[in-house]
Amino acid sequence: MNSIRNTTDDMSDPANALAFLAEGMLNGGDPGPSIERMEADGQRQLVNSDRLPTQILHGADNDEPFLALGFTFGEPDKGDPMFRPATLPEGWKREASDHAMWSHLVDEYGRRRVAIFYKAAFYDRSAFMSLETHHSYLFHLLYENQDPVLDDVWLTADAAIEELDRIAAGFEDQAAKAEGFGAKSPEDSYWTERAAEQRTRKAEALAMRARIGGSS
């Protein structure tokens, strides 16, 4: 397994700092491309490593929900306590997203179950992970125009229908609020368009619900 380079420590080496500056000069003094390369390198290192972030978002660093799924964790790395060794549940794997700061752990059905944030930029390096919820999983699929994969353990048909009802209600609430703002500024078409957009998203959520087996 590849390691995850500690870019902050790397830049404390004058040779690496000079190389970074030279790369920026080749880009016309713009450090942006160098930072983007660093971020992309960090993502590749993460998805090809056996490490996961030590910090768990929305869980007060509570490992229990992960352990219940079959994860195991080692102690934080002495030289880089931002990460620690980890094994995944059987059938799960790491997957890069199209955004260099975000990667995912997908289960045996290919469902995104854990979101991993890793900002590899040396000046603001940080990492955390969080378990996906039914809401985040279904919400993502709505925008990807994909149907969910159901099972009898994590996401049953009943649970998906219940969550889609909540999502649809949320879209309706946003549409109603937009209409309220639009009534105060009838000359501004933004709010009318916003309400129509939210109602379209609501219809898509209810269509997914109907495909699963619930009536809209």
Image (cartoon, helix red, strand yellow):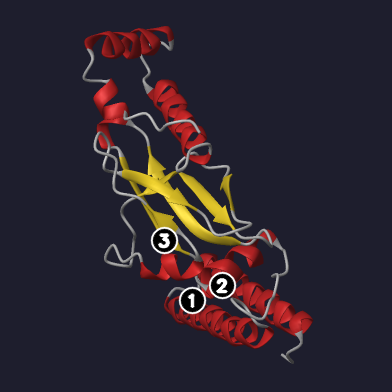
In terms of secondary structure, where does tag 1 sit?
helix
| Residue position for label 3 | 130
Going by the numbered disc 2, the residue's amino acid type is Thr
CA gap, disc 2 to disc 3?
A: 35 Å
Q: Nearer the viewer, mark 2 or mark 3?
A: 3
Query: In the rendered image, which quarter is residue 3 located in?
Result: top left
Question: How would you rate the neighbour count of disc 1 (Cα within 10 Å): few for under 14, some for 14-19, many for 20 or more?
Answer: some
In terms of secondary structure, where does tag 2 sit?
helix
Q: Nearer the viewer, mark 1 or mark 2?
A: 1
Cβ–Cβ under 8 Å for marks 1 and 2:
yes
CA gap, disc 1 to disc 2?
A: 7 Å
Residue 108: give x, y in percent of width and height.
Answer: 66, 60
Q: In the rendered structure, which disc, 1 or 2, sits on the residue that comes first in sequence? A: 1
Residue 10: give x, y in percent of width and height.
Answer: 29, 21
| Residue position for label 2 | 192
Query: In the rendered image, which quarter is residue 169 located in?
Result: bottom right
Residue at image location 27% in from the left, 8% down from the top: 15
Going by the numbered disc 1, the residue's amino acid type is Ala
Q: In the rendered structure, which disc, 2 or 3, sits on the residue that comes first in sequence? A: 3
Residue 109: give x, y in percent of width and height.
Answer: 69, 62
